[in-house]
């Protein structure tokens, strides 16, 4: 997949193969269980896979890092990140069972042994993780409330443990109600495609 290679030239042939497999796999599964807008499936490489990987432009997860993906839907951002960071551990959750069915199928087909998944709400989880990632599942203050108690105190990365959230538009009002330090990164600074013009990575720590 040229678009991934363009921005992540260091990935190996096995990772390239996995990223390439995502397109037919999601196309096939999306026809059975709608996890991506039918009109949007042709934009999968940029709007979903590359968008997920914007997180990797602000942090390189170290070996043994644990990451929780809340409201993963069909596996974004968790599955692309798990391909990119094979030595980190990802737990993908969603409260909708059929979405987890798709996640399970994709993870199994790719042989991703650093990914687990579960049909559960974030509020019901009792484990802790180094980072919580998500893609625009709700407003930031509400999301922070759901997951704040699930962030581990044990640090192993250059960035402090916290939330890494993908969202678009003007976040000024939402960030006023965030009780922790935060930093907003413009994805257009990393990727030149027009889709990313208003998209952001929000890091709360």
Image (cartoon, grey):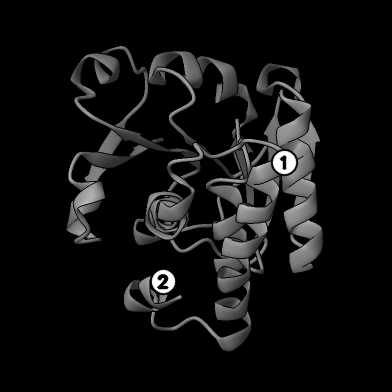
From this view, report whether residue 127 is shown above or below residue 84. Answer: above
The mark found on residue 51 in the picture is: none
Depth order, front residue of 77/202: 77
Residue 115 falls in which quadrant of the image? bottom right
The residue located at (33%, 77%) in the rendering is 6
User: N-terminal of the two: label 2 or label 1?
Assistant: 2
* Label 1 packing within 10 angstroms: few (<14), some (14-19), many (20+): few
Q: Position of residue 188 (x, y in %)?
A: 19, 53
Name the residue rendered at 36%, 24% in the picture: 180
Q: Secondary structure at mark 1?
A: helix
Query: Alpha-carbon distance for marks 2 and 1?
Result: 26 Å
Pointer 2 and pointer 1: residues touching (CB < 8 Å)? Answer: no
In the rendering, at what x and y percent does residue 167 appear?
34, 34
Residue 169 at what x, y percent from top left? 22, 29
Give the SS element for disc 2.
helix
| Quarter of the rendering containing residue 17 | bottom right
Is residue 193 visible to us here?
yes
Outermost residue, bottom direction?
Answer: 13
User: If the image is split into quadrants, where does the C terminus sit?
Assistant: top left
Q: Could you tell whether 69 is left or right of 32 in the image?
A: left
Residue 46 percent across, percent down from the top left: 37, 57
How dense is the environment of label 2, judged by Cα within 10 Å: few (below 14), some, or many (20 and up)?
some
Q: Is residue 152 visible?
A: no
**In percent of the image, x 63 and y 72: which residue is there?**
18
Q: Which numbered disc, 2 or 1, marks the residue closer to the eye?
A: 1
Q: Which residue is mark 2?
A: 4
> What residue is disc 1 on?
32
Front position in the image: 75 or 93: 75
């Amino acid at each position: 997949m040229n678009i991934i290679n363009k921005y992540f030239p260091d990935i190996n042939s096995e990772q390239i193969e996995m990223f390439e497999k995502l397109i037919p796999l999601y196309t096939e599964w999306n026809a059975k269980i709608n996890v991506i807008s039918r009109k949007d499936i042709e934009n999968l490489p940029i709007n979903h896979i590359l968008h997920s990987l914007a997180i990797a432009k602000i942090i390189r997860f170290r070996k043994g890092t644990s990451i929780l993906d809340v409201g993963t839907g069909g596996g974004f951002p968790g599955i692309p990140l798990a391909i990119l960071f094979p030595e980190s551990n990802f737990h993908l959750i969603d409260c909708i069972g059929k979405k987890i069915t798709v996640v399970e199928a994709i993870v199994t087909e790719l042989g991703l042994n650093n990914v687990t998944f579960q049909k559960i709400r974030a509020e019901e989880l009792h484990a802790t993780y180094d980072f919580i990632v998500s893609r625009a599942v709700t407003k930031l203050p509400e999301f922070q409330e759901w997951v704040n108690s699930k962030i581990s105190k044990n640090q192993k990365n250059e960035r402090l443990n916290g939330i890494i959230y993908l969202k678009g538009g003007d976040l000024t009002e939402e960030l006023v109600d965030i009780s922790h330090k935060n930093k907003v990164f413009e994805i257009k600074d990393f990727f030149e495609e027009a889709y990313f013009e208003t998209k952001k990575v929000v890091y709360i720590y």
